[in-house]
Image (cartoon, rainbow, N blue to C red):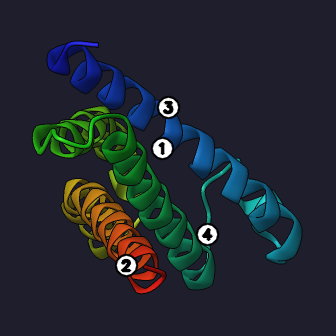
Amino acid sequence: MKPVWRTILSVCVGLIAWMVVATILNFPLRVWLPGYAEAEPAMEFTLTMKIARLLIGGFSSLAAGAVARVIAPASRAAPWAVGVILLALFVPEHVRLWSKFPVWYHLTFLVTLAPLVALGATLWSRQTAAGERSASSVAESGR
């Protein structure tokens, strides 16, 4: 596959990964966080609920970056493209919901979105590189 197509694919799959991870992590939140399921429709969250939502967004961003890096390991732009597209998708929603959440919540989510995607890609690269170094060390010591 040509690098440009691999990059485009990684961006698309990274965006899907963000949505899938956020959705999957939201299910336990509804079950285990008292009152969350009732607060969700009206978006009347407690501080604990807001922090939990931010953590879900953070984990989803890290996962999206890792997925983008797995698909297009040579592309430095792919994770940032995922983050910028997510930001473009979420800014209008946060503007619409501006009065429902405190400013710190909006800023925390929006300002960290793209950097966390990039961090997820970087962490995956480092983990993969460390694993390759470890595997080659084991292979060399066996000679």
Label 4, secondary structure: give it.
Answer: loop
Which residue is the site of mark 1? 18
Q: Earlier in the sequence, mark 3 or mark 4?
A: 3
Q: Looking at the rendering, in which quadrant would you find the N terminus?
A: top left
- The furthest residue to the front: 143
Disc 2 versus disc 1: nearer the observer: 2
Please rate how many residues cluster around mark 3, counting C-alpha atoms within 10 Å: few if below 14, some from 14 to 19, many from 20: some
Q: Position of residue 77 (x, y in %)?
A: 11, 39
Whole-Å distance between the Cαs marked 3 and 2?
40 Å
Question: Closest to the observer: 106 or 68?
Answer: 68
- Asked if the residue at tag 3 contacts the one at tag 1, i.e. Cβ–Cβ closer than 8 Å, the answer is yes
Please rate how many residues cluster around mark 1, counting C-alpha atoms within 10 Å: few if below 14, some from 14 to 19, many from 20: many
**Which numbered marker is on residue 16?**
3
Q: Position of residue 110 (x, y in %)?
A: 25, 57
- Asked if the residue at tag 2 contacts the one at tag 3, i.e. Cβ–Cβ closer than 8 Å, the answer is no
Which residue is the site of mark 4? 45
Amino acid under label 3?
Ile
Whole-Å distance between the Cαs marked 1 and 3?
5 Å
Question: Closest to the observer: 21 or 95?
Answer: 21
Which residue is the site of mark 2? 140
Amino acid under label 4?
Phe
Place residue 2 in its image quadrant: top left
Residue at 44% of width from left, 29% of height from top? Answer: 13
Disc 3 versus disc 2: nearer the observer: 2
Amino acid under label 2?
Glu
Residue at 48% of width from left, 82% of height from top? Answer: 142
